[in-house]
Amino acid sequence: MSKPSENDPSSPLNRREQTFPRLDTEMAGRIAAYGQEEHVPHGTILFQRGQRRVDYFFILDGCIEIYDHAEDGSPRIFNVHGPSQFTGEVDLFSERQAMVNGRTGADTHLVRIDPAGFRKMVSAEPDIGEIIMRAFILRRVGLIQTGQGGVTLAGSAHAADTVRLRSFLIRNGYPYRLLDTDVDDDARHLIDGFGLDPSECPVVILPDRRVLRCPSTGALADELGITIELDGTHVYDVAVIGAGPAGLAAAVYAASEGLDTLVLEALAPGGQAGTSSKIENYLGFPTGISGQALAGRAQVQAMKFGAHMAIARSVERMDCSSHPYRLHLDDDSVVSARSVVIATGARYRKLVQVDYERFEGQGIHYAATAMEATLCAGEEVVVVGGGNSAGQAAVFLARTVAHVHILVRGDG
Ligand SMILES: Cc1cc2nc3c(=O)[nH]c(=O)nc-3n(C[C@H](O)[C@H](O)[C@H](O)COP(=O)(O)OP(=O)(O)OC[C@H]3O[C@@H](n4cnc5c(N)ncnc54)[C@H](O)[C@@H]3O)c2cc1C
């Protein structure tokens, strides 16, 4: 979670007109054709955290309050949408669970559009769709920057399981607040307050105050509703295994051609590219783009065309002895598809060192993102390898660490 800066042009705080745009009456008229008008009394709950397939609301008169809950359970309003504005963020394109709640802040005249109508509207009205898409992406960036609607992760920032869970939340664009039990008194008080033993950390504390003790990434994805609910009886046209750049590209093209597309990803969208601080050679981004931003955009693009995303779901084996093919997942579920695209990318080669596994995630990392840079701040760091990624990592880490050593086995 990074603090929004006054000088950051990408911060939603500095782009309020794009994050919370007001549409003109001509656009409002076109939007109304995809849903129905309703007069809703003050204080009516329109959607709640945890709900899937939330409706889109366009306000004609009145207002809608967006809120999460403070630690004492009271509602904490952090946005109010007024006339000519609309609700929603990127999860409206998916079947993920909503992270925030919405209720009318006054007697309100609005247009309600269900998920199918919303999808139709976004593709049939491209000028409106572009405004909505930009606003939704900025709103998610805002939630990540402020941690609103997110979870609390408490544990030692350097422990392997904290690194695993933190990296999972970051790479899935899920808002969170880290309380480091090594340095933060608040974290220690919180652990005591919940009656937890420090050995149970890291823990994830949900907004309803339930505590997940060192959950697996799959269990966390299920609890947060990051992944879709798979239907074992459904047959997809295409199943894409892996959501790196190749898998996401396949999903965009398959879904945009009208094919019923499922993406199965073991960890988080973006793959290796998701760990790159800047990609300079991707077509269409002349000034470069961070791997995380590229992955986020590609994921939203795929979902906009109707691709379904199953996250933290690893394909263990495929049964191709009959058609449709059957894919067996690590949670023992099975999905069927008429065709399969395998885009599982690379697996990291490991160094042969004594006790290597013990230090994975707590000293040995496979990426040099902002999280690793923070963890290594002020320390001496060794980058193993001499390719492009190693050079990029060395330059990136040099901003925060005491010294970067590069180990290359060859001469070049
Ligand atoms: C730090 C870094 C910087 C880079 N910078 C650049 C750059 O600037 N320019 C450039 O051109 N390239 C760059 N690369 C290389 C580029 O990222 C890769 O070539 C690219 O990501 C490969 O894409 P992919 O989709 O084929 O595979 P991957 O990115 O490896 O994605 C594969 C995905 O499949 C998932 N997966 C694997 N097995 C399963 C399974 N059984 N079930 C479900 N999911 C599975 C993985 O979790 C992963 O998300 C960089 C790489 C790194 C690591």
Image (cartoon, rainbow, N blue to C red):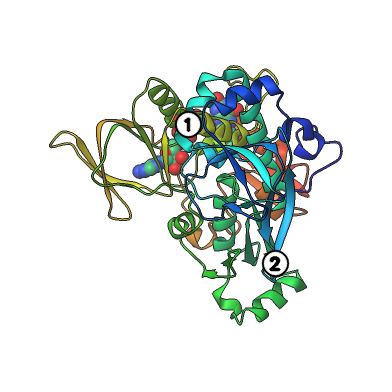
Which residue is the extreme one toward the left? Answer: 321
Quadrant of the image occupied by residue 91: top right
- In the displayed structure, does residue 230 sit left or right of residue 318? right
Looking at numbered disc 1 in the image, what kind of residue is underneath it? Gly
Q: Where does the image place residue 8, in percent across and percent down from the top left?
A: 81, 36
Q: Is residue 225 above or below residue 53?
A: below
Q: Find residue 117 and name its label.
A: 1
Q: How many discs appear?
A: 2
Q: Residues within 10 Å of mark 2 (few under 14, many from 20)?
A: few
- Give whichever of 174, 100 is nearer the camera: 100
Looking at numbered disc 2 in the image, what kind of residue is underneath it? Ser
Residue occupying the point 61% across, 40% down? 89
The residue singled out by tag 2 in the image is 74
Q: Where does the image place residue 319, in percent across and percent down from the top left?
A: 19, 41
Marks 2/1: CA–CA distance:
33 Å
- Give whichever of 145, 43 is nearer the camera: 43
